[in-house]
Image (cartoon, rainbow, N blue to C red):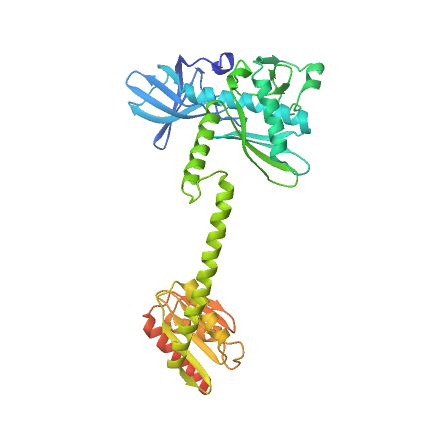
């Protein structure tokens, strides 16, 4: 198979002959005698585009393979046949942006190696951004990043030539210059990509002819992945402008939502968080006041068995809030047990000073009679999924608890 993307990565369309056709579910796969579609590999995604023939059209979603490249996509029209001639049309915007990203990565990786002796251990182009993984001892900072960005963009704007060379056997003088050593897996001829005099490395991807075409490289995020490996996310070319526009749009819209609309946003967020904390503190204070009055009302109506007050109630609160109230009630009131039943939950809680009954044992008795599941401990137990109405379950729980307290 002739891989025309290596001979001329700027070739956007051509013709080819079908060598094989396969069905893959609702998709179709075809193999051609030659192709301009770059297959996924080396961190670069596969090309997209169209393959057309008489009476059919394939929207190519991916190309894959090494020696033999298969083109997979959605078929419109009749099924193609072996031997037929087709026209290949690349999604050029997708390909060209990927070329910019890949060439920009070579420059950024070379700069990180030069400045910090950081090797690039991984690389991938995504839909909207790219990532590399580098080794870096210590804490990577925005100061480190800015220094690398400035140098990388200075190199890009120098309009350096990006060359591809092939070697049947790599000369020793070339091997010494490599940023990354040649893999032992490569047995056939070696493809070397050179970026001016700043980078030389084995690579199987497609690249621009000049660094100037990359346009811009911008790091958008970085974080530590493991002991000394950092992930650096970046964008190049038009994707850099698109990403920055999205960030700025989000920034200004967010700032516009603040009571104080003056920059910087981080100060406005701090003010917002302080205000939110004050509201939460006030909410907590009011909740405890409400719990206090609610507790007094429930205790005044509670049934008392051998000095133990039993508060039983059908609650409309979410389980988290009902549990918080039950714990507050029994903690603040000695000799108190709370049986709280919601639409889909049950909570049993007792004051720690009560020794005679266990909440988890009471729950087990209820589960054995009404089904469901749950668990807990001596002081607090929770369950749900009962095969009966809340009123029935709560009534039975009261009966069993009273029996335990009276025996």
Q: Residue at x 30, y 24 (%)?
A: 76
- Depth check: 274 or 290 in front? 274
How far across and how far down the image is residue 382, in percent? Answer: 45, 68
How far across and how far down the image is residue 32, in percent? Answer: 42, 17
Q: In the image, 397: left or right of 111?
A: left
Residue 112 in view:
yes
Q: Quadrant of residue 23?
A: top left
How far across and how far down the image is residue 370, in percent? Answer: 37, 71
Q: Residue at x 28, y 18 (%)?
A: 55
Depicted 135 relative to depicted 397: above or below:
above
Q: Residue at x 41, y 37 (%)?
A: 253
Q: In the image, 158: left or right of 60?
A: right
Q: Quadrant of residue 71?
A: top left
Q: Residue at x 45, y 76 (%)?
A: 362
Depicted 48 relative to depicted 388: above or below:
above
- Depth check: 364 or 98 in front? 98
How far across and how far down the image is residue 401, in percent? Answer: 43, 80
Residue 350 in view:
no
- Depth check: 127 or 283 in front? 283
Depicted 60 relative to depicted 170: above or below:
below
Q: Quadrant of residue 135?
A: top right
- Depth check: 209 or 56 in front? 209
Q: How many marks?
A: 0
């Amino acid at each position: 198979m002739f891989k025309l993307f290596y001979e001329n990565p700027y070739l956007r369309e051509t013709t080819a002959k079908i060598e094989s056709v396969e069905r893959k579910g609702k998709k179709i796969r075809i193999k051609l005698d030659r192709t301009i579609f770059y297959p996924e590999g080396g961190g670069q995604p596969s090309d997209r585009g169209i393959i057309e023939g008489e009476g059919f059209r394939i929207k190519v979603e991916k190309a894959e393979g090494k020696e033999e490249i298969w083109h997979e996509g959605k078929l419109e029209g009749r099924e193609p046949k072996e031997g037929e001639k087709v026209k290949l049309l690349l999604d050029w915007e997708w390909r060209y942006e990927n070329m910019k990203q890949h060439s920009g990565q070579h420059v950024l990786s070379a700069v990180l190696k030069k400045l910090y002796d950081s090797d690039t251990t991984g690389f991938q182009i995504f839909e909207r951004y790219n990532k590399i993984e580098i080794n870096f001892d210590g804490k990577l900072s925005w100061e480190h990043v800015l220094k690398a960005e400035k140098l990388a963009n200075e190199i890009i704007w120098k309009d350096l030539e990006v060359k591809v060379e092939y070697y049947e056997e790599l000369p020793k003088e070339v091997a010494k210059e490599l940023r990354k050593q040649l893999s032992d897996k490569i047995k056939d001829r070696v493809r070397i990509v050179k970026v001016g005099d700043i980078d030389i490395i084995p690579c199987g991807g497609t690249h621009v002819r000049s660094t100037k075409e990359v346009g811009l490289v911008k790091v958008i995020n970085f974080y530590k992945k493991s002991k000394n490996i950092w992930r650096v996310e970046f964008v190049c070319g038009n994707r850099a402008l698109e990403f920055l526009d999205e960030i700025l749009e989000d920034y200004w819209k967010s700032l516009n939502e603040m009571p104080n609309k003056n920059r910087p946003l981080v100060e406005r967020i701090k003010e917002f968080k302080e205000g939110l904390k004050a509201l939460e503190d006030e909410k907590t204070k009011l909740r405890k006041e409400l719990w206090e009055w609610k507790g007094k009302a429930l205790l005044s109506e509670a049934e008392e068995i051998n000095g133990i007050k039993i508060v039983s109630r059908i609650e409309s609160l979410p389980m988290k809030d009902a549990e918080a109230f039950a714990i507050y009630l029994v903690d603040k009131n000695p000799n108190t047990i709370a049986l709280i039943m919601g639409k889909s939950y049950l909570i049993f809680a007792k004051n720690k000073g009560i020794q005679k009954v266990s909440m988890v044992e009471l729950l087990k008795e209820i589960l054995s009679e009404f089904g469901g599941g749950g668990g807990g401990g001596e002081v607090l137990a929770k369950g749900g999924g009962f095969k009966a109405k809340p009123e029935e379950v709560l009534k039975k729980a009261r009966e069993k608890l009273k029996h335990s307290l009276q025996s």
